[in-house]
DNA sequence: CGGAGGGTTGAGATTCATCAACGCGTGTGG
DNA sequence: CCACACGCGTTGATGAATCTCAACCCTCCG
């Protein structure tokens, strides 16, 4: 059965959510799940809805975002396979302040909300993992608030590129895996501003060509690498897999 | 002893952190604490520091905020007595992305970080409470991101006043307990802009006089009360103590 | 070949920050 | 008791950053 394959997949085993869980524990959780397919553009959850499941993304791409009645929206997180969402709405189970949308055809493990909230009360590893996951979201959200209010557009873009580099193990070239218009939205700006910012960054040692990014040495060590980032640079190995 | 008094105080008993804990459990936690005094302006934690304690504010006022090397800063949360901070940095214990400052002379319970991280692994109520607290922070942070990127200054101020009204049980008048310059910063704008926004809101039924706010009926039910807020209005009683 | 989606570029509009001046209440020292 | 300074908030004028709108380009795909 497909769940039995999943059980031993790297995707599960290296995820934050299944981290440290024994086979028996993982199997018990899997027993309370089903796999759902979502089409590109389909909503997994809409604003105001009380979630019945927690999501573990198996493949594809999910965005968590928030929209105004007028129709404009802001992307909060962009998830790829192995990441989870909707945990933060389970404690306590409340109407969701955000919505979740598949931006590509996606496959996700739907974990029953009731089961997880109960299971977290008896299993320390699960509740600990959830704490780590939600705390990580919260810290990321703080950085988002920081950069949107305190930094200008060009800085935000530079910071974003730098974080991508760090997350991939401090490589100096990589691909942008999301649409530029989505990245712009995530960074709290319009696509036009992102485009102009990237142009601005070329002067500082950034090359971008059709989705491929190359960062020069000077950029990697430059002004964008502030105190916090420098700390991360120094201990890259231990942090490269983080976030 | 003062800790024994604390044990039965409403402050502790009605807090999210000590919620549902038995006397024995609360006593065990208190055994791993000490009480610290902070002067107005003193730093409880600086950016980059690894916290040794989790804070439970007994009296006074703490801000969690983030600053740039250039010195500008943004307030993330404004805490009053009974609230906690620095939990989100304990899972895992990392250099703090934020700093914590006392904005008034304050007294806080310092709970040993090592103890709490261990205790959370054996006590479900504690880990559950922590989950609820951090999830609440995260949801609030999402709303902050939403309003800063998607709404204009006047809307943000109106929304803020409305949330104050709801949190106090949907009263139509109340005092602003923070300095206006701090409120402005928290809302991601300058004091000048806050001032002008309040003036703008007067046309919509808001009266502000030296820190005292009066909201008209029309304002309470007006455009600021969007779908999410309306839901809260309907079931006010169950939500009034929330946030 | 033609159309659609995504990205870029340019020009104008707008919001908000900045800078400077002022008013007001409070506390302090002569 | 008055003079003064200081913190805080307001108001007005100016400027900068970014959004908006429009045109255009490129690539992909039927």
Image (cartoon, coloured by chain):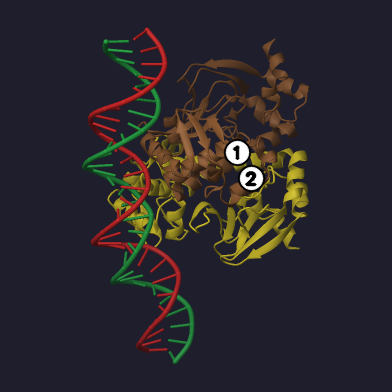
Chain colours: A brown, B yellow, C green, D red
Classed neighbour count for the residue bearing mark 1: other residues with Cα under 10 Å, few (<14), some (14–19), many (≥20): many
From the top left corner, tell me how far across and down residue A113 is, in percent. 61, 26
Which residue is rendered at x = 38% and y = 39% of the image? A196
The answer to which image quadrant residue B159 occupies is top left
For this rendering, which residue is in front, A178 or A112?
A178
Residue A119's place in the image compared with B20, above or below, is: above
Left or right, C17 with reference to A28: left
Spatial CA distance of label 1 from label 2 is 8 Å
Left or right, A2 with reference to A98: right
Residue B195's place in the image compared with B227, above or below, is: below
From the top left corner, tell me how far across and down residue A137 is, in percent. 58, 38
Q: Are marks 1 and 2 on the same chain?
A: yes
Q: Which label number is shown at residue A243?
A: none
Circles 1 and 2: CB atoms closer than 8 Å: yes
Q: Secondary structure at mark 1?
A: helix
From the top left corner, tell me how far across and down residue B21 is, in percent. 71, 45
Residue marked by disc 1: A166
Left or right, B122 with reference to B238: right
For this rendering, which residue is in front, B26 or C7?
C7
Inspect this view and state whether residue B170 appears.
no
Which residue is rendered at x = 56% and y = 59% of the image? B61
Host chain of mark 1 = A
Classed neighbour count for the residue bearing mark 2: other residues with Cα under 10 Å, few (<14), some (14–19), many (≥20): some
Which residue is rendered at x = 65% and y = 30% of the image? A117
Inspect this view and state whether residue A133 appears.
yes
**Disc 1 or 2, which lies upstream in sequence?**
1
Residue B82's place in the image compared with A171, above or below, is: below
Q: Secondary structure at mark 2?
A: helix
Residue A111's place in the image compared with B173, above or below, is: above
The answer to which image quadrant residue A209 occupies is top left
Residue marked by disc 2: A232
Q: Quadrant of the N terminus of chain B?
A: bottom right
């Amino acid at each position: 059965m497909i769940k039995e394959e999943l059980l031993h997949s790297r995707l599960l085993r290296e995820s934050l959510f299944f981290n440290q869980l024994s086979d028996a524990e993982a199997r018990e959780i899997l027993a309370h799940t089903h796999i759902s397919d979502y089409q590109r553009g389909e909503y997994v959850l809409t604003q105001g809805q009380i979630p019945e499941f927690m999501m573990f993304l198996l493949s594809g791409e999910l965005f968590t975002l928030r929209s105004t009645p007028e129709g404009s929206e802001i992307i909060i997180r962009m998830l790829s396979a192995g990441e989870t969402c909707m945990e933060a709405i389970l404690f306590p189970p409340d109407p969701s302040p955000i919505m979740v949308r598949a931006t590509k055809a996606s496959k996700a493990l739907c974990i029953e909300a009731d089961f997880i909230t109960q299971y977290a009360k008896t299993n320390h590893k699960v509740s600990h993992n959830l704490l780590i996951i939600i705390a990580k979201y919260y810290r990321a959200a703080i950085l988002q608030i920081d950069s949107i209010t305190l930094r200008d557009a060009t800085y935000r873009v530079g910071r974003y590129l730098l974080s991508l580099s760090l997350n991939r193990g401090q490589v100096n070239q990589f691909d942008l895996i999301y649409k530029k218009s989505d990245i712009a939205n995530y960074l709290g700006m319009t696509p036009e501003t992102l485009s102009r910012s990237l142009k601005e960054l070329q002067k500082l040692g950034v090359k971008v060509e059709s989705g491929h990014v190359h960062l020069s040495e000077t950029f990697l060590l430059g002004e964008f690498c502030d105190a916090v980032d420098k700390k991360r640079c120094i201990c890259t190995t231990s942090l490269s897999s983080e976030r």
